[in-house]
Amino acid sequence: AVLGAEAWVEASRGRLRLGSEVAAQALALGTEVGRGARRTMIGARVAMAHIHRMRDELDSAVDVLADHLAAARREGHIAITTLGEAELALVDGARGDVGAAISRVQRVRLELQARATSPFLRLVLDVAECRVRLYAGDLERARDLIAEIAPGTERRLLAERAAIDAGRIDGVIERLTDLRERGDRRRRFLATALSARAAAEADDVATARTLIGEVVEMAREEGAVRPFHDEGFDIDDPALGGTATTPARPGSGTAVAARTLVEPLSDRELSVLRFLPSRMSNREIGTELFVSHNTVKSHLKAIYRKLGADGRDDAVRRARQHGLI
């Protein structure tokens, strides 16, 4: 149990390699002890799920944790299972399954209402839901959640992400300077990715590359892919600095910028593509372009196929690497 808690602390600070080693020790020790140690192993599983999510290994995050949460909850491990549910909600959001993510968060909120829970657990759920809402482009609800979160680093990071999504990029880089320079590894990665995205949205690609170059070796060593992926960057791309030594991931689009599209996008597809970073819904994009919702969906299918993208965020990332947006 102590090893599991230590693993979670290290992982939550962005020290993914150390967290993974400690979690593996906890799971191995628990397996040796046998069934009676099952309840003490949930912390290590939550840590591993967080590590897998940060490394963009979403299926592994689910596999290591999902089947164990119900038993841990029945045994009264409310705090750690809440952390686990928040992790799985973020996995759902990263996969684009926003409905499942929000349902998960709301179910846990209802469970906690019947108990005297700590402000920390409410913060965990608020942060998870806010990130999912930002994935979905639901800026109105995301802003409401940010207003309810106590002042601190998590609120700052979420507020800057919301500002960028709303097109307000002025001052983002300057406001995040302290987190990029003095935060723990996880916060440095998040602050750097946001700063680089703000620079890229201002068409300052050189600054974006410089910013990521300051942490890219550390991020590659830890395998911390997801913070950069969320903002449209692939840290395996050698153009971002250093030597890309991490193995290519299926669907990751490693070094996409070095390849050309097999089939170029049509003018109408390019028009749709340029709306994707705005987080507008398909229906809203159709209204702007004076085409039907179904027509937008057809163009998106063609865009994803031609870019080799798995979804909207992946298409934005690959389009930026090709210089299309």
Image: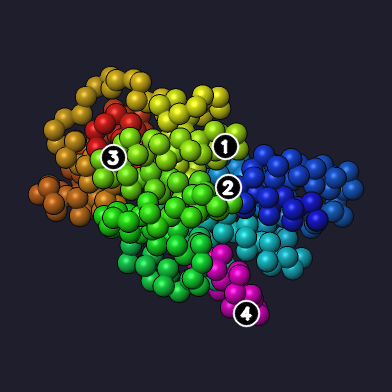
Q: Earlier in the sequence, mark 4 or mark 2?
A: 4
Which one is closest to the eye, mark 4 or mark 1? 1
Tell whether 96 sits left or right of 291.
Answer: right
| Residue picked out by circle 1 | 218
Q: Which mark is residue 204?
A: 3
Relative to 313, is 263 above or below? above
Per the model, the C-alpha gap separating discs 4 and 1 is 42 Å
Q: Secondary structure at mark 2?
A: helix
Task: Look at label 1 and name its amino acid.
Answer: Met
Q: Is residue 117 magenta?
A: yes
Front in this rendered view, residue 143 or 289 = 143
Magenta stretch?
A: 110-127
Q: Quadrant of the C terminus?
A: top left
Q: Main secondary structure of the magenta part?
A: helix
For mark 3, give the secondary structure. loop
Q: Residues within 10 Å of mark 2 (few under 14, many from 20)?
A: many
Q: Secondary structure at mark 4?
A: loop
In the rendered image, which quarter is residue 77 located in?
Answer: bottom right
Q: Residue at x 51, y 49 (%)?
A: 181
Question: Do residues under tags 1 and 2 come within 8 Å of each other at their CB atoms?
Answer: yes
